[in-house]
Amino acid sequence: MSTVADLPGARPTALARVPRWLPGVVRFLRLWEGAAWWLAGRFLLAGPLDVIAHAWANAGLLTRAAAVTLENAAWGFVIGNLAAVALALMALALPRGAGVVAGLALVVFCLPLVATAPILRVLYGPGSGPQITIAALAVYYTTFIPLMVGLRAAPASWFDLIRLYGRGGPSALVQVRAMAALPYLVAGLQIAAPAAILGAMIGEFTGADRGLGVLVIRAMRGLDVTATWTLATISAAVAMAGYGALGALGRWLAPDRPEALLTPPPASATRLAERAAIGALTVLVVLLLWWAAMELADLNRFFAKRPDDVWRFLVTAPQAAAARATLAAAMVETLLWTIPGYVAGLVLGAALAAVLTLYPAAAGSVMPIAVALRSVPIVTTAPLIVLMLGRGATGTIAIVAVMTFFPALVACLQGLRQAPGQVLDVFAAYAARPVQRLLHAQLPAMLPAFFAAARMSVPAAVLAVTVAEWLATGRGMGHLMALSASTSNYNMLWSATATLAAVSALGYAGVALLERRALRRYAPEQLS
Amino acid sequence: MTLPDAEVAPEVVIEGVSKTFAGPVGPIEAVAPVSLRFAAGQTTALVGPSGCGKSTLLRLVAGLEPPSTGTISIGGQTPDAVRARAGLSMAFQDPSLLPWRSLRGNIALALKLARKRADPAAVDRLIALVGLAGFEGARPAELSGGMRQRAAIARCLVTEPRLLLLDEPFGAVDEMTRARLNRELPALWQARGATALLVTHSVREAVLLSDRVLVFSARPAEVVADIAVAFSHPRAPDLVRTNRFLDLCDQVSEALSRGETARRLVAE
Ligand SMILES: Nc1ncnc2c1ncn2[C@@H]1O[C@H](COP(=O)(O)OP(=O)(O)OP(=O)(O)O)[C@@H](O)[C@H]1O
Ligand SMILES: [Mg+2]
């Protein structure tokens, strides 16, 4: 059994868990302070002591801001997750429509928050509406996906049991599906906690008057290094606390956690034609809902553009060619920096996970740190990376890479643990070398988790790059959207939003296609 | 006191029933057209080689699968109608306990689904009877394979159904416990006069527990032998050493191997 026991993160006991954090945190703080000393005078990095001093001096302001952000995030968290549950139940109730519901959910998730935020600001006016909505938009998908898996995760025989006593769908939902989905829901909620804070802060970037996001913008504009680091530390701490609190709640609610959280809604065995039909239907439904929402709410056509406005702006209007050229140029700029960062983050995450598997002792201490850092919202990391690596390609690519690296690392470490114990025992029985075990048993087991992370990272990478472009680099789609918003060029803003959402959704679908190919080849048992 | 209709053990009539699954390499005929009649209140053992369709037949009787052809009647009603009033119960080949419920919770769930009042004392008595006293609060993950199977038997019996479908209920149970369960459990349904279909791979068990043994050939299955077991219930412990008992066991074993050979000849 030793094979299983020395795998990374083989369930630590509660006792062993607490002290394992401490040395890591202390080491991290010392490194940070050391770096600050070393870089002193270059206005890049504020050390922990500076941060504490700054926080102390501005305690009142920071506490009020954090409270506002937390409140908005909490509302968004509740609304977004309720929406996720409703969507998942809808997909369950309409098995034929499930593909379209999932597609719709994906497209909405792919809406670039950087553009949605200013649009919402115009729609809502002042107040916390946009922050809450953005927070809800940022969380619902990461709950919806595991929930969809969880609601179908029960073996057929459990449903037979329900039917055996003459009971149907409602009993199955209460007695089997809800209970089987609970651990998945809890896992989704945990990831949603930091995402809600991220969403609330993005909402605050666009003309809110209170909250951490407002202070971040102010600190960045004023090139206030200490304030930037202090705010990043506070929002990271708040996000991690939220993540930890939801994790504790989850362990109490559902002690049996699913091993892999976002492992695929396995690429179903539907044929290409069928998938194309679902895709086309999804596009139709999206356009229809978009149009209907604007019409029903009777929103002013000046800022609430309809699909036909976008069509006119990009295709039939006299200046359409110029508009298309602007959009295309920005898109190319964005993609040129997104793709390398995305790939680098994924590859580094997977590689580190694989290497760590060969050094189980190290993996044990990296896992909690990786899980913690994964929960740090990109809006807090982005300004720091820009401070350190500059506003050019390196900084932007690094931001995207950081965004994809941690989810990939965590998912892959979890995936590597999926290798069935009996299979590992066989390798142990033949005294196979760890590398052989990794190649033949663990890597194939890791693939589904890797691809799940890769899929989910597509919209995340787009979010990261647009945030960076908007806050710092002044290029690409993020900048174009920010500029269009500030000059009230709503035709361009809506066109950019729609295009970017379409590109991210296509990227997601592309990764899903690759996933099916790869799984069919290397892990066919994972395809249902 | 007159028993309501539902309380009378039903006769099960299978007429021209077959079941074909769409397999990855073409259709699989799991059950070839078969007509059988199971008398009310009798226990019938079904034996046959692995994969010959025994589980499928039980699932058809339970109405969990629709038959491809033919009809099934349970006391004159369809399986769906019988299930709708929780008139039957089945112990699956794999225990299928819900992992988040305790042993007691799993058994109580059957009562709840069957809309029957849960009598905690009765549940605990049944748990003790299958030898799981002391584990009432345990989760399935904390039980061994054999213990889980016994839990599933208890769950099947707790609703006191008039038709029991038992799919290798003792498959993973150790030899000693199995012998004890063979002695003690049948009384629970036979005394109430329930109809039971019991799938087993043990020839001895088939003869010991049943009033009739049906021997199937390999897939597509045919009935190779239909052997009456005319011992009265409850059966004495030393029955297994009598010549009549051993003789019946021989007949069943011989029919089993005959079924194998017949199939092999067909295949060649
Ligand atoms: N849901 C299904 N889909 C496709 N084929 C099935 C299905 N269920 C059973 N089969 C096939 O039907 C045949 C009979 O299966 P069944 O489970 O009834 O056998 P069995 O007699 O119970 O075997 P065992 O003694 O091993 O339990 C097998 O060839 C099996 O592969
Ligand atoms: Mg079977």
Image (spheres, coloured by chain):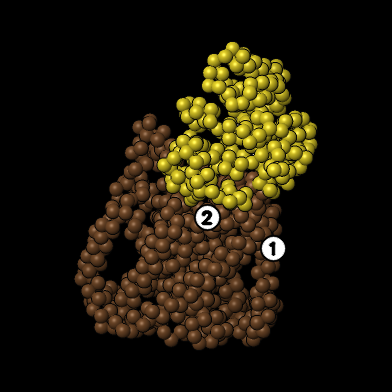
Which of the 4 quarters of the picture holds residue A21?
bottom left
The residue at the point 53 percent across, 27 percent down is B183
Q: In front here: A269 or A251?
A: A251
Letter of the chain that mark 2 sits on in the rendering: A
Q: Circle 2 sits on which residue? A: A179
Write down the chain letter for disc 1. A
Camera-near label (1 vs 2) is 2
Whether residue A57 can be seen here: yes
Q: Quadrant of the N terminus of chain B?
A: top right
Number of dots carrying numbers: 2
Q: Amino acid at mark 2?
A: Met
Q: Spatial distance from mark 1 to mark 2, Cα to Cα?
A: 32 Å
Give the residue displayed 64% in from the left and 18% down from the top. B252
Quarter of the image containing the C terminus of chain B?
top right
Q: What kind of element bears circle 2?
A: helix
**Do marks 1 and 2 share a subunit?**
yes
Chain identifier matching the yellow colour in the rendered picture: B
**Residue tagged 1:** A281
Task: State which quadrant residue A58 falls in.
Answer: bottom left
**Residue at 63% across / 57% down in the picture?**
A170
Q: Amino acid at mark 1?
A: Leu
- Image position, residue B70 (x, y; %): 79, 36
Q: Give the image location of residue A207, x and y in percent.
A: 47, 85
Viewer-proximal residue among A231 and B60 = B60
